[in-house]
Image (tube, rainbow, N blue to C red):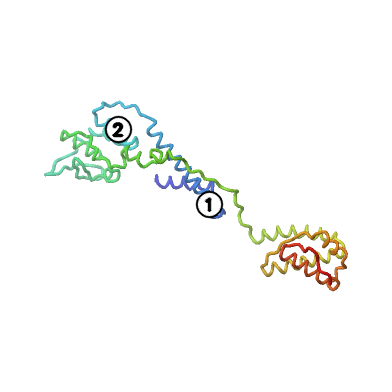
Amino acid sequence: MGSRNELESINGKLKQVINRHSTLEAFVDRFFIILTALRTERDHKAALVFQRVKVNPFRDDSSENMYSQLLTNYSANFQLELADKLANKLSQITEEGDTYVVKTSEGQKNVTISSCECIFRKSMLLPCRHIFALRSQLGLSTYGAALCNERWTTAYYRSTHRIFSARSSEGTMVLTTGNEHRRSLSQHQKFRKMSILSVELASVASYASKNQFDRRMKVMKELILYWKNREEVGLAELNESAHKIFNACSGEVGEVSSESDDEQHSLKTGTPTDSPSQG
């Protein structure tokens, strides 16, 4: 359950920062921000383990004190709890030939001074109370560094955290992110936005004179044709001379044919016409 709760906690933190409709680029940026925050939180917890020194009530040469020095606080607490239950197990160990047998809630288990068949020893890789009881019964010290797996030692804990490594003093990686990416619009949302602009465009065009309105209609029809053909076009402001010619013309294509060609060329290429040629 511990691993599941940890995953749920990480998932909750990801949901707070990463939007469901985020783009891949935004997801990667925010994911590394969360990853950096989790690593910093892990470093903080590791630093507190060594900053908070517990009061040691045991003698310097006692097994409890030596286990406290060898193991992390989490694993050392297991050994201290097992030491309290040691007396209850002394009478339950019997010798059968070359082996020793202890009665447990799981049934009879074989035990030696360095191994045991109980679930605690197999899962935690720490000396169980059965090993402690047998070693005490044989007059041996209950302390043994070889009985503890390396992953529970303080030295291993320090070596696996970046806060204690030499590279941690070289600097900290800084992540920067740009503006938040907007989610993609659906086809219906795009249609609604364009409808609002088209209504405003129609309102502005309706106040023009007849010739101006005809020219604007022609431009809009050509714009629609370009978009249907998946061609991109741009607008360019006409210079003063070209503007006077357009105001003077009657709007008929036959009167100034080259002027219409220049206007179409200006719309398609995005470059203004310097001086339309006369027909």
Q: Is residue 231 above or below residue 61?
A: below
Residue 188, horizontal then vertical, whole percent: 67, 61
Q: Name the residue: 44% across, 42% down.
A: 39
Query: Residue lying furthest bottom in this view?
Result: 254
| Front position in the image: 162 or 166 | 166
Residue 176, horizontal then vertical, whole percent: 54, 46
The numbered mark, 2 or 1, whose residue comes first in the sequence reads: 1
| Front position in the image: 23 or 238 | 238
Residue 227 as seen in the image, left or right of residue 63:
right
- The secondary element bearing badge 2 is classed as helix
Quarter of the image holding residue 133? top left
Using the image, tell me which numbered label, if any, was put on residue 121. Answer: none
Residue 127, horizontal then vertical, whole percent: 25, 39
Residue 59 as seen in the image, left or right of residue 193:
left
Residue 13, horizontal then vertical, whole percent: 50, 45
Task: For marks 2 and 1, give the CA distance.
Answer: 44 Å
| Front position in the image: 10 or 120 | 10
Q: Name the residue: 83% across, 59% down.
A: 240
- The secondary element bearing badge 1 is classed as helix
Residue 202 as seen in the image, left or right of residue 41:
right
Using the image, tell me which numbered label, if any, was put on residue 69. Answer: 2
Q: Is residue 205 above or below residue 17?
A: below
Residue 12 as seen in the image, left or right of residue 130:
right
Which image quadrant: the C terminus?
bottom right
Q: Residues within 10 Å of mark 1 (few under 14, many from 20)?
A: some
Using the image, tell me which numbered label, if any, was put on residue 27. Answer: 1
Q: Amino acid at mark 1?
A: Phe
| Front position in the image: 6 or 66 | 66
Q: Residues within 10 Å of mark 2 (few under 14, many from 20)?
A: some
Q: Amino acid at mark 2?
A: Gln
Quarter of the image holding residue 43? top left
